[in-house]
Image: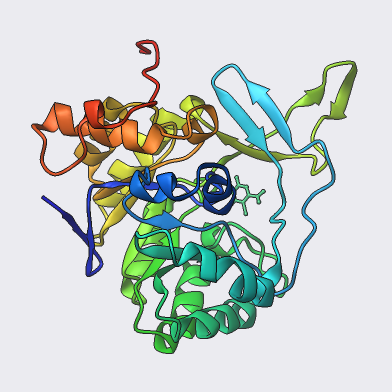
Amino acid sequence: MTVGFCGLELAHPIVNASGTFDAIAARRAFGDALLERFPFAAFVSKTVTLEPRQGNPPPRLWELPGGMINSIGLPNKGLHGYLGHDLPELAELGVPLIVNVMGFTREEVAELVEAFAGRDEVAALELNVSCPNVETGMIMGADAGETAALMERVRPLTGKPLIVKLTPNCSSPGDVAAAAEAAGADAVSLINTVKGMAFHPRRPGAPWLGGQTGGVSGPAIRAVALAQVAEVRGRVALPIVGMGGVQRGRHADDLLQAGADLVAVGTESFRDPLAGARVAAELSEMRGNRGVPRLAAIPGSSPIPDLA
Ligand code: RRO
């Protein structure tokens, strides 16, 4: 049985979290075998900005006992590089393509949305609102008014589904989600990473990450994700893509129980590139095989030790 999401028909409820699975590199490494056994029911591409970006200075990662902190800083080819190089390759994956975009002003986001509005390869857009609006100094997705103003600007530009990717780093994700819904969003996704910091192991007090602070992901934030998905479900009727620390089918099931419609696997894909398929299969086994692949059908997927 397939899963409906914003008018898309998906083979199962597991997708990837933006920026955590490089499908182009994976296709190069595994060839068409990747397409035959693609781990996700839809592919969410890494964030695209209007202009090309180098990203943050290194180091960009810090490993935690329960996950990691990243401070990648949006390295990407920019809109034109994406349209010319990435989009044609991502369009061949055989699953719906969701493009994640971010701008530093509302007009930048509008330009990005307009550029993708007419592209048949793109099934939906995810708006990454975890960055500052350089005109107001506010993190767009940390403020309900900013989020509403952004949605009002971009909603008329496309009939494609618009998914607002919420940040957990705000006082009320529920308020922001409600504002996004009232202004015409088709879905929300949450949570993005939780702001964190690590000191250099040999220079106490000196930040390790080149970007000073970064985003915590992995099992460390699973309970935060569960609480925020449940909170947002209490505030909106929109479809929700839930994510944060999912390693197993049981964790995906928890997010579904909390009110998510789809679940994204993120950090776990760095450890196990087939984690998406494994989580889908485990979920299927838990839920009585309602349309997701069975674990036995996924050679090479790596079971992991039982975690609490
Ligand atoms: O590129 C990043 O450093 C980054 C982004 Br855009 C994001 O949305 N979330 C994250 O953890 N890192």
The way the protein has been coloured in the rendering is rainbow
Q: Quadrant of residue 182?
A: bottom left
Q: Residue at x 77, y 54 (%)?
A: 55
State the image coordinates of residue 261 (x, y, percent, origin top left): 24, 50
One can see residue 304 in this view: yes
One can see residue 103 in this view: no
Left/right placement of residue 195 relative to residue 211 reads left
Choose between 35 and 17: the one closer to the eye.
Answer: 35
Choose between 244 and 264: the one closer to the eye.
Answer: 264
State the image coordinates of residue 43 (x, y, percent, origin top left): 42, 56
Q: Residue at x 83, y 17 (%)?
A: 201
Q: Is residue 235 above or below residue 255?
A: below
Q: Is residue 112 above or below residue 174?
A: below
Residue, far right: 203
Q: Residue at x 52, y 85 (%)?
A: 114
Q: Quadrant of residue 275?
A: top left
State the image coordinates of residue 198 (x, y, percent, origin top left): 74, 27
